[in-house]
Image: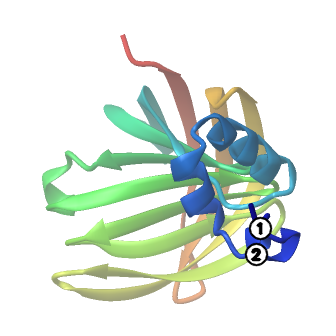
Amino acid sequence: MRRKSLKSNLNITPRAYTKQHSCCRVLLRIFASKRGGKTMMEKRNVKLQIASQSDGQMIEQTFNAELYVKGDHSYYRYNETDENMGRTITTLKVEPGQIRIIRHGDVQSEQSFALQSHRSFSYQTPQGRLELTTFTHAINVGLVEQIGTISWSYDLFVSDELSGTYSLIVEISELD
């Protein structure tokens, strides 16, 4: 009986190997996550309660969202319910030192918030495009396993003119 050489075993792809040896899937996933490798994103359903304050007005909204975790980034994805947003999917991305709000659909934008930083972005609606800038005053992230509170405050500028100061608090909880 002829033995396969070690070299020929190295030509097997991890996907093919794990199909043949299902007990190795978990070990490969653990190994990949410890090395910062690409792994499948975990999906959970959560509830977002968002309170936004500007010029003395408070707006509160509640969304059911899908939570995805990849490495040290958390993604909270939900459908906008405001009729002015049309059919828009929003993703709140929380990463070390930065928060992003990414919108796709009838409204398209990617806002980025980093402490004591100016960030420019465009806000595209069916009616037209706006060039905007934010300056972030504060960011607080208090999450344990992606559940908890995120808050930030920022100035919004339109054509270098201060449009308003905004404070947001996002309470994230497990979906009942």
Q: Residue at x 55, y 61 (%)?
A: 16
Q: Nearer the viewer, residue 96 or 118?
A: 96
Looking at the picture, does residue 175 appear above or below residue 90?
above
What number is the disc on residue 70? none
Q: Relative to residue 47, is residue 70 drawn left or right?
A: right
> Looking at numbered disc 1 in the image, what kind of residue is underneath it?
Lys
Q: Residue at x 76, y 66 (%)?
A: 2
Quarter holding the C terminus is top left
- Nearer to us of marks 1 and 2 is 1
Q: Which residue is most to the front?
A: 1
Q: Relative to residue 49, is residue 39 drawn left or right?
A: right
Residue 161 appears in the picture as rendered? yes
Q: Residues within 10 Å of mark 1 (few under 14, many from 20)?
A: few
Looking at the picture, does residue 85 appear above or below residue 140?
below
Q: Which residue is most to the top?
A: 176
Q: Nearer the viewer, residue 66 or 139?
A: 66
In the image, residue 122 lies at what x, y percent? 45, 84
Quadrant in which residue 112 is drawn: bottom right
SS at mark 2?
helix
Q: Residue at x 16, y 61 (%)?
A: 87
Q: Residues within 10 Å of mark 2 (few under 14, many from 20)?
A: few
Q: Name the residue tied to disc 2.
A: 8
Looking at the picture, does residue 122 appear above or below residue 29?
below
Q: Name the residue tied to disc 1.
A: 4
In the image, residue 165 lies at what x, y percent? 59, 56
Residue 59 appears in the picture as rendered? no
Tell me whether the residue at label 1 lies in contact with that at label 2, contact meaning CB atoms closer than 8 angstroms.
yes
Q: Residue at x 49, y 73 (%)?
A: 110
Quarter holding the N terminus is bottom right
Looking at the picture, does residue 162 appear above or below residue 161?
above
